[in-house]
Amino acid sequence: MVTAVNVLLAIVCLGLIIVVLLQSGKSAGLSGAIGGASEHLIGKTKARGIDALLGKVTVVLAILFLILTLLAGYSDVWAK
């Protein structure tokens, strides 16, 4: 049980790091607004959709991280 929780925790940690790094920064919207109108025609809504999806995945992975961290802490105490 302890090993399974630790392996899942490591996978969730890596997933959370990757998802956070894939998200665009808060200043990306300002540079896009100044950059020109070409992004407006090509697919600005697609970028917003991907950012929204990454945001939801981040929330799910963060909740899983919290739960697995608590389980790992309690399972260490129970194992001793």
Image (spheres, rainbow, N blue to C red):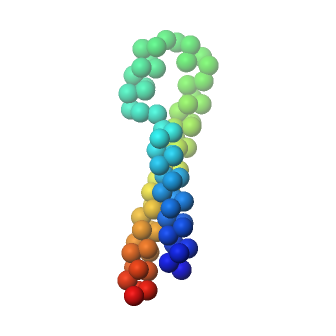
State the image quarter where residue 29 is shown.
top left
Residue depicted at x 47% and y 49%:
17
For residue 13, say whether it is visible. yes
For residue 56, say whether it is visible. no
Residue depicted at x 39% and y 75%:
73
* Residue 45 placement (x, y as % from top left): 57, 29
* Residue 72 placement (x, y as % from top left): 43, 74
Residue depicted at x 56% and y 13%:
38
Image height of 62 relative to 5, above or below: above
* Quadrant the C terminus occupies: bottom left
Image height of 30 relative to 13, above or below: above
State the image quarter where residue 53 is shown.
top right
In the image, 19 versus 76, the foreground residue is: 76
* Residue 58 placement (x, y as % from top left): 48, 50
* Residue 56 placement (x, y as % from top left): 51, 49
- Image-based side of 65 in relation to 41, left or right: left
* Quadrant the N terminus occupies: bottom right
- Image-based side of 66 in relation to 57, left or right: left
State the image quarter where residue 47 is shown.
top right
